[in-house]
């Protein structure tokens, strides 16, 4: 039985804002430097962003058909149940809770704290102390919880504040996300325009590749896949809107419309931001930058300009973090209502009418994730698992077309079956190359942790819990509880 205790109060403008606010955040301000170091060519960098954007767009449109047909609270968790049954829907829900949402939200919040370091010097342990505490996970790698401890504490404070706001009011949260979204777009437009009119760059940068970074053959393929991985992380987040399909007005019209408009805006913005940064910073300088956006503005406008962009980025990522804190607990709430999680997480707050307990459970795990990793560990771990289950969701479209041929579909994905099939093949290729490259880098000593394998291990940890909850609630049902 599906519970529908939330009211449909979210309109098209808020849904679009949620898509934009969730997507535009940390990735675009961190990944371009990594992509420059991998590809060494402006043309290839733009190609990676376009490929990832179109792939995300088509994938979102596939999910929009399912969401418009099954507008239930819990979103993709509920979709997986209709496609594959209870076990896989639970495992997706667990992965979304433990990896995709909590680890992902923790990773995004990291960036807010890291850019705040431009203004405040957070305390930090000496390298010897940072390395003194290590947790080794067999066949996965090592975790150092004392790394960047001051940044981690600030990240936890940010998560606590945003959870408190989400706990108290859905309406206030929606208003704040609208403010974050519009201010973010305006700030980015000003940033891009400022870099181009500064006169401190050169259009020749768009045609000059690195002299030192020249991947070729299979190395180019793995470099492009790794670069697309970063871009996919930057585009990830639009699916969060699907968690609140049970609260969206006119879901058959507003779900696909908000996804298409929101993603289109984000693709254009990402390309403009990359173009502006490349205009000011040649590829080799981008590749060596730790805070690439601030470095670009500092070249154009000096230290004050770098400080301004650091503030704007912190504000931008705060909005993304807020939307990630606000929406995913709805899935955990739905799992608890389906007897697939602890019952306390399935209660609506009697005064605030929010999934208060689910929000607190997410906060607890996000704090653990912050202490266990860094931005790149958490981001790469969750994006791999996102696309593992996205592959299943894409295949699930074909399953639902067969299982529910007469179900009303307010929206049908364009190009069926060939477009979804191409997305499935690309998705499978991306996952295989990413996993192989991750393992190879660990074996060669280039990384301390296999991020994709870590995500798989955390996901698999939910399997015993599935059988526990099934046993626990079956016994209660047999006893008449």
Image (cartoon, rainbow, N blue to C red):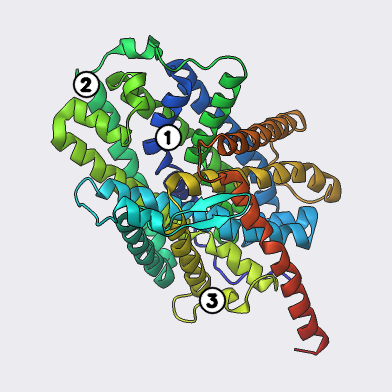
Image x and y of residue 473, in percent: 75, 79
Q: Which residue is mark 3?
A: 348
Relative to 478, is 455 above or below? above
**Depth check: 11 or 195 in front?**
195
Image x and y of residue 462, in percent: 67, 63
Disc on res. 197: 2
Is the Cβ of the residue at disc 2 closer than 8 Å to that at disc 1?
A: no
Q: Which residue is mark 1?
A: 31
Q: Is residue 341 left or right of residue 128?
A: right
Q: Is residue 1 visible?
A: yes
Q: Cα distance, mark 2 to mark 3?
A: 51 Å
Looking at the image, is mark 3 or mark 1 nearer the viewer?
1
Residue at 47% x, 71% y is 360
- Of helix, strand and loop, which one carries label 2? helix
Relative to 62, is 39 above or below? above
Of the two numbered discs 2 and 1 on the same chain, state the one appearing first in sequence: 1
Q: Is residue 450 left or right of residue 166?
A: right
**Depth check: 328 or 34 in front?**
34
């Amino acid at each position: 039985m599906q519970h529908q205790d939330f009211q449909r109060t979210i309109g098209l403008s808020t849904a679009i804002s949620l898509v934009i606010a969730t997507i535009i955040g940390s990735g675009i301000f961190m990944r371009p430097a990594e992509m420059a170091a991998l590809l060494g060519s402006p043309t290839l960098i733009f190609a990676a962003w376009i490929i990832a954007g179109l792939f995300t767009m088509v994938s979102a449109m596939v999910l929009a058909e399912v969401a418009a047909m099954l507008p239930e609270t819990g979103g993709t968790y509920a979709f997986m149940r209709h496609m594959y049954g209870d076990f896989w829907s639970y495992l997706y829900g667990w992965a979304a809770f433990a990896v995709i949402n909590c680890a992902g939200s923790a990773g995004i919040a990291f960036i807010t704290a890291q850019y705040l370091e431009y203004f405040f010097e957070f305390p930090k342990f000496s390298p010897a102390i940072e390395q003194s505490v290590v947790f080794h996970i067999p066949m996965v790698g090592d975790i150092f919880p004392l790394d960047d401890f001051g940044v981690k504490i600030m990240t936890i404070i940010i998560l606590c504040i945003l959870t408190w706001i989400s706990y108290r009011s859905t309406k206030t949260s929606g208003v704040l996300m609208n403010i974050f979204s519009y201010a973010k777009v305006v700030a980015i437009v000003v940033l891009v325009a400022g870099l181009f009119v500064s006169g401190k760059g050169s259009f020749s940068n768009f045609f000059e590749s690195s002299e030192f970074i020249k991947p070729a053959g299979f190395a180019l393929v793995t470099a492009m896949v790794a670069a697309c991985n970063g871009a996919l992380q930057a585009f990830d987040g639009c699916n969060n809107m699907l968690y609140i399909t049970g609260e969206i007005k006119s879901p058959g019209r507003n779900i696909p419309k908000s996804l298409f408009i929101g993603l289109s805006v984000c693709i254009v913005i990402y390309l403009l931001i990359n173009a502006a940064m490349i205009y000011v910073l040649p590829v080799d300088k981008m590749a060596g930058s730790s805070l690439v956006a601030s470095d670009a503005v500092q070249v154009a406008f000096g230290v004050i300009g770098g400080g301004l962009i650091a503030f704007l980025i912190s504000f931008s990522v705060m909005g993304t973090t807020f939307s990630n804190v606000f929406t995913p607990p709805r899935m955990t709430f739905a799992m608890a209502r389906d007897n697939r999680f602890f019952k306390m997480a399935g209660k609506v707050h009697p005064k605030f009418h929010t999934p208060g307990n689910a929000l607190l459970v997410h906060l607890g795990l996000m704090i653990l994730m912050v202490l266990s990793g860094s931005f790149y560990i958490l981001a790469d771990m969750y994006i791999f698992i996102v696309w593992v289950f996205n592959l299943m969701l894409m295949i699930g479209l074909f399953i639902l077309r067969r299982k529910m041929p007469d179900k009303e579909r307010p929206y049908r994905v364009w190009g069926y079956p060939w477009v979804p099939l191409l997305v499935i093949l690309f998705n499978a290729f991306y996952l295989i190359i990413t996993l192989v490259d991750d393992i190879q880098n660990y074996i060669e000593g280039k990384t301390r942790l296999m991020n994709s394998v870590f995500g798989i291990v955390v996901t698999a940890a939910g399997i015993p819990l599935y059988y526990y909850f099934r046993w626990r609630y079956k016994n209660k049902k047999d006893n008449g509880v």
